[in-house]
C-alpha cells in the first residue's frame, strides 16, 4: 500500500489516486499461494486465456459474419476463403470452443478430486458452475451461427427441450424462436446473445476470482497454509509455471488448428441448413454428449429434460452433499476409488451420447445415468459418514519437505468431525 | 582475500550480463510472437479476396450521346463518365494554368478528349457533386457543384472555387475498344 513500493513517479502519482497498481501488485505479484500446487492448478489460468482467445477471435469474426438465414452459411464460407486469415481465425474460434471445454472439464474434475468446493469455497464453486452453464449456452448458440445442418437441427432439438415444460412449454418455444420454427429471428437473436454472453462470463469470472482470492487456492493436500512458510508469492513462481503450462496448451491447440481443425466438428455442418430434412444421425458437439446421453436415457420427455438439467443442478449443491471435512481425495481411500469410477462414468456417458439411441446403448446409458446421480446423491453423503480418512500432514511445508510428524493435524480434523 | 573477492565480483557481473541477455531475448521473442498473433487479427479488416476481385469493371460508352453523362459504380463509389460537347472541350483546354487551384492540363486528365472519366467524389469531404443529370446545378464553371460545402468544378472536373483542395480524381482506366472502357 505504501507509495514507495513503486519507483516510477508517474505510477506513484496514479496509484495514490487510483490504487490500480497496488491492487495488481497485491493480487498478481505478492499474492501468497500454496507452495505445493501441482499442474492441475494450471487449468484455471488456461480457462481464462481460452476465454480471452474466444472473445478476441469472436469479435473479429463478427466483422465478416452475416446473421441472416440466406447469407450466414455463405458468409462463413467467405470467411474461410476470402477474408484475410479468415480460415485461421475461424479455426481458432471453432477449436477454441473445444479446448475451452477440455480445460474447464479438467478444472472441474480437479475441483472434484481435491475437494475445492468445500468450505470456505462454496460460493467460488457455485460461481464456477454458473460459468459452466453460461459457457454451454454460449457454445450452443455459437454452433447455430454457421447455419449448417447440425446448426439448424441442433437448435431445433435443444429449443424443443423447453416444450417439455407442462402447459406453457409450447408458448415458451415459440417465444424462443420468435416464430413457429427455427428461422431468421432465431438466428438473429442467437447471434446477439452469443455476442453478449461471453461478457457475462467475464463478469462472473471476475466474481470467481474475487471469491478465490478471499481464501486463496486450495492445494493437493487440502489443508490450509499455516503461515508464510507454506506459501510462495504468485510472481514469479506461479506466473512462470502458468506460462509454461500455457505454452504446452498453445502447442497442442496449434496442432489441432493446423493439422486436424475439423476433427472435433461434424461434417454435416458443412451442408447448408435445410428445414425440410433432418440428417440421419444428429449429435451435439462432443462437450455436450454426456448431458445428451442423460437426456436420452430417461424414457419420458419431461423426465429426460429434468435429468439433463439436474445433472448440472446437482453440482450447485455439491458442497452440501459431500460433508467430509477432508478436502483432498489423497487422504480419502474410498472416495478416491469412487472418484475414478465417477470419472469413468462421465467418459462412458460421453461415449454413449455419441452412439445411436438403440439396443445395448440405451441400457448402458440408463446405468451410467443412474450411477451419475447415485454418486452425488447417495455415495458422497454416505462416504462423509462412514469413511475413515488417512492422517493428514501437519503442514504444507511438511508434506513438501517430507516431514514425519503427521499425527497432529489429522487428529485435530477428526475432532472436528 | 582481495583476490577471491574480485573473482567473486567478476562472476556476479558475468552472471548478471548473461541474465540480462536471457531476459531481453525472452521479451524480444514474446514481442515477436505477440506481433505475429496480432497481425491476422488486424489484417482481416483489409479488403478480402472477393472484394479485391471486384476491383475492375467494364463499361459500354457507345450509348452516351454528346452532352450526356452516366454514373457507374466502381469499388463502391460513383464514377462519372461524360461525353463532352465541343464547347466544353474547348473551354476546358483553353483555361490558363495560372487560374487553377490544382494546376493540371485537360489533356492530362483524359485519354480521349471526348470522354471525361473521373471519380464522382468531392475531394473535400467525400460527398457526390451535382451536375450529372440535366437540370442539376452545375456550378459557376459549368461542370459540377458539390452541395455539401460549395465546391465548384469545371468541365474537366478541376476545382475552381470552394474548399476542395484538389481536382476530382481520375481512376485508372483504359479503352478496351472504341466504345468499351475498363475501369480499375
Image (cartoon, helix red, strand yellow):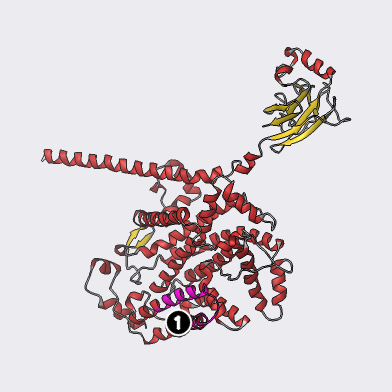
Residue range in magenta is A341-364
Q: Residue furthest right?
A: B135
Q: Residue at x 58, y 48 (%)?
A: A81
Q: Position of residue A132 (x, y in %)?
A: 52, 67
Quadrant where the N terminus of chain B sits is top left
Mark 1, residue position: A375
Quadrant where the C terminus of chain B sits is top right
Q: Nearer the viewer, residue B22 or A177?
A: A177
Q: Nearer the viewer, residue A379 or A293?
A: A293
Q: Position of residue A8 (x, y in %)?
A: 41, 42
Q: Position of residue A353 (x, y in %)?
A: 52, 74
Is residue A359 covered in magenta?
yes
Per the picture, the main secondary structure of the magenta-coloured stretch is helix
Is residue A381 covered in magenta?
no
Q: Residues within 10 Å of mark 1 (few under 14, many from 20)?
A: some
Can see residue B150? no
**Circle 1 marks a residue in which chain?**
A
Q: Position of residue A167 (x, y in %)?
A: 71, 81
Q: Secondary structure at mark 1?
A: helix
Amino acid at each position: 500500500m505504501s507509495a514507495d513500493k513503486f519507483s516510477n513517479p508517474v505510477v506513484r502519482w496514479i496509484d495514490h489516486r487510483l490504487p490500480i497498481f497496488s491492487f495488481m501488485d497485491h493480487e498478481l505479484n505478492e499474492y501468497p499461494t500454496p507452495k505445493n500446487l501441482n499442474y492441475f492448478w494450471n487449468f484455471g489460468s488456461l480457462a481464462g486465456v481460452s476465454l480471452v482467445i474466444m472473445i478476441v477471435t469472436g469479435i473479429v469474426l463478427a466483422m465478416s459474419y452475416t446473421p441472416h438465414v440466406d447469407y450466414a452459411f455463405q458468409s462463413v464460407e467467405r470467411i474461410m476463403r476470402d477474408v484475410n486469415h479468415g480460415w485461421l481465425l475461424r479455426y481458432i474460434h471453432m477449436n477454441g470452443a473445444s479446448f475451452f471445454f477440455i480445460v474447464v472439464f479438467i478444472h472441474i474434475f480437479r475441483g472434484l478430486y481435491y475437494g475445492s468446493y468445500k468450505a470456505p469455497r462454496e460460493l467460488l464453486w457455485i460461481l464456477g458452475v454458473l460459468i459452466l452453464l453460461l459457457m454451454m449456452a454460449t457454445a450452443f448458440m455459437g454452433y447455430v451461427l454457421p447455419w449448417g445442418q447440425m446448426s439448424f437441427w441442433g437448435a431445433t432439438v435443444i429449443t424443443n427441450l423447453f416444450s417439455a415444460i407442462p402447459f406453457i412449454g409450447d408458448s415458451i418455444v415459440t417465444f424462443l424462436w420468435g416464430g413457429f420454427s427455427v428461422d431468421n429471428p432465431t438466428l438473429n437473436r442467437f447471434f446477439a446473445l452469443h455476442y453478449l454472453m461471453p461478457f457475462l462470463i467475464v463478469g462472473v469470472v471476475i466474481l470467481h476470482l474475487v471469491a478465490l482470492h478471499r481464501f486463496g487456492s486450495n492445494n493437493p493436500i487440502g489443508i490450509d497454509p499455516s503461515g508464510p512458510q507454506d506459501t510462495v508469492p504468485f510472481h514469479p513462481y506461479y506466473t512462470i509455471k502458468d506460462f509454461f503450462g500455457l505454452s504446452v496448451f498453445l502447442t497442442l491447440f496449434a496442432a489441432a488448428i493446423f493439422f486436424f481443425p475439423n476433427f472435433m466438428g461434424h461434417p454435416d455442418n458443412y451442408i447448408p441448413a435445410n428445414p425440410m430434412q433432418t440428417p440421419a444421425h444428429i449429435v451435439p458437439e462432443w462437450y455436450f454428449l454426456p448431458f445428451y446421453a442423460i437426456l436420452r436415457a430417461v424414457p419420458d420427455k419431461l423426465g429426460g429434460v429434468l435429468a439433463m438439467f439436474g445433472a448440472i443442478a446437482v453440482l450447485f449443491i455439491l458442497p452440501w452433499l459431500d460433508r467430509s471435512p477432508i478436502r483432498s481425495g489423497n487422504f480419502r481411500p474410498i472416495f478416491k476409488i469412487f472418484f475414478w469410477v465417477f470419472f469413468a462414468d462421465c467418459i462412458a456417458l460421453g461415449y454413449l451420447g455419441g452412439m445411436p439411441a438403440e439396443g445395448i446403448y440405451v441400457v448402458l446409458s440408463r446405468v451410467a445415468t443412474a450411477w451419475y446421480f447415485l454418486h452425488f446423491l447417495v455415495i458422497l453423503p454416505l462416504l462423509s459418514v462412514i469413511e475413515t480418512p488417512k492422517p493428514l500432514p501437519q503442514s504444507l511445508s511438511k508434506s513438501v519437505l517430507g516431514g514425519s510428524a503427521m499425527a497432529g493435524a489429522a487428529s485435530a480434523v477428526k475432532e472436528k468431525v | 582475500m582481495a583476490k577471491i573477492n574480485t573473482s567473486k565480483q567478476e562472476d556476479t557481473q558475468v552472471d548478471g550480463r548473461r541474465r540480462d541477455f536471457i531476459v531481453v531475448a525472452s521479451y524480444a521473442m514474446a514481442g515477436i510472437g505477440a506481433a505475429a498473433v496480432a497481425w491476422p487479427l488486424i489484417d482481416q479488416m483489409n479488403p478480402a479476396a472477393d472484394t479485391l476481385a471486384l476491383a475492375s469493371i467494364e463499361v459500354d460508352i457507345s450509348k452516351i450521346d454528346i452532352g450526356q453523362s452516366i454514373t457507374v459504380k466502381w469499388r463502391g463509389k460513383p464514377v462519372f463518365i461524360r461525353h463532352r460537347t465541343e464547347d466544353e472541350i474547348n473551354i476546358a483546354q483553353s483555361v490558363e494554368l495560372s487560374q487553377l487551384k490544382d494546376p493540371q492540363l485537360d489533356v492530362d486528365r483524359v485519354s480521349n478528349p471526348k470522354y471525361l472519366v473521373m471519380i464522382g467524389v468531392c475531394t473535400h469531404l467525400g460527398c457526390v457533386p451535382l451536375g450529372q443529370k440535366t437540370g442539376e446545378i452545375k456550378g459557376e464553371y459549368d461542370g459540377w457543384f458539390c452541395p455539401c460545402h460549395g465546391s465548384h468544378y469545371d468541365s474537366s472536373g478541376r476545382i475552381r472555387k470552394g474548399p476542395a483542395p484538389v481536382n476530382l480524381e481520375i481512376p485508372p482506366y483504359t479503352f478496351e475498344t472504341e466504345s468499351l472502357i475498363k475501369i480499375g
